[in-house]
Amino acid sequence: MTKCPKCGHENADNTQICEVCGQLLVLPSATRQYSDTDYEEGTPKWGSARFNGAMNLVLDVLEADDQFIFDYDQIDEVVIGRKDPGGEAAPGVDLSNVNGLEKGVSRRHAMIVRRDGALHIVDNNSANGTYLNGQRLVAQQPRILRDGDDIRLGHLVIRVSFRPAT
């Protein structure tokens, strides 16, 4: 049974609108939540963590033909997520076009920050968590990114590459 937050009426499970007062019982376009057991824990990777002005950050969305490329100077903070249909500005890495909503990506899921000659990934208290090489990140605690790392946001995986700038 689903209890209405407005009138307290007990509605049948999977009811989206309260039968008595008409209150919406589900949030529209809310991030789909997944179980932590949907994926196996990954294996550590040992690529270089060094990221300097002669390099580009390349983010390849696995299982899609999307790629995001950032010059060194473009990266102070890059938000990864999906566009808010309400009109808020799109994040630097907008995963809306690769089924981000259906795959459990929050609007401001995570961010990549440049600090002390290295890049770090930070989970922004996302609904489905951020995983670095299969290990769940603690929200708001930066973890260093290395060349070849895999970032999982919900059920969407991004491969990190550091490539020479052209």
Image (cartoon, rainbow, N blue to C red):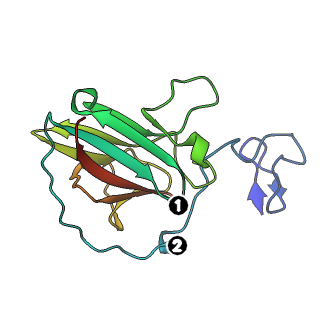
Q: Residue 118: x and y, percent?
A: 15, 44
In terms of depth relative to the viewer, which is nearer, 11 or 7? Answer: 11
Furthest residue toward right = 19
Q: Residue 88: x and y, percent?
A: 54, 24
In terms of depth relative to the viewer, which is nearer, 99 or 141? Answer: 99
Image position of 162 with respect to 54: above or below: below
Residue bearing mark 2: 38
Furthest residue toward front = 166
Q: Residue 115: x and y, percent?
A: 15, 38
Q: Left of 146 or right of it: where is 83?
A: right
Residue bearing mark 1: 155
Q: Left of 88 or right of it: where is 41?
A: left
Image position of 70 with respect to 32: above or below: above
Task: Indicate which disc residue 76 carries.
Answer: none
Q: Residue 18: x and y, percent?
A: 84, 47
- SS under mark 2: helix
Contact check, label 2 and label 1, Cβ < 8 Å: yes
Q: Nearer the viewer, mark 2 or mark 1?
A: 1
Total tally of numbered discs in the picture:
2
Q: Which residue occupies 43% across, 76% down?
A: 40
Measured in 3D between alpha carbons, the distance from the residue under mark 2 to the one under mark 1, in whole angstroms, is 9 Å
Q: Left of 48 or right of it: where is 93?
A: right
Q: Which residue occupies 51% across, 24% down?
A: 89
- The quadrant the N terminus occupies is bottom right
Could you tell me the amino acid type at mark 2? Asp
Could you tell me the amino acid type at mark 1? His
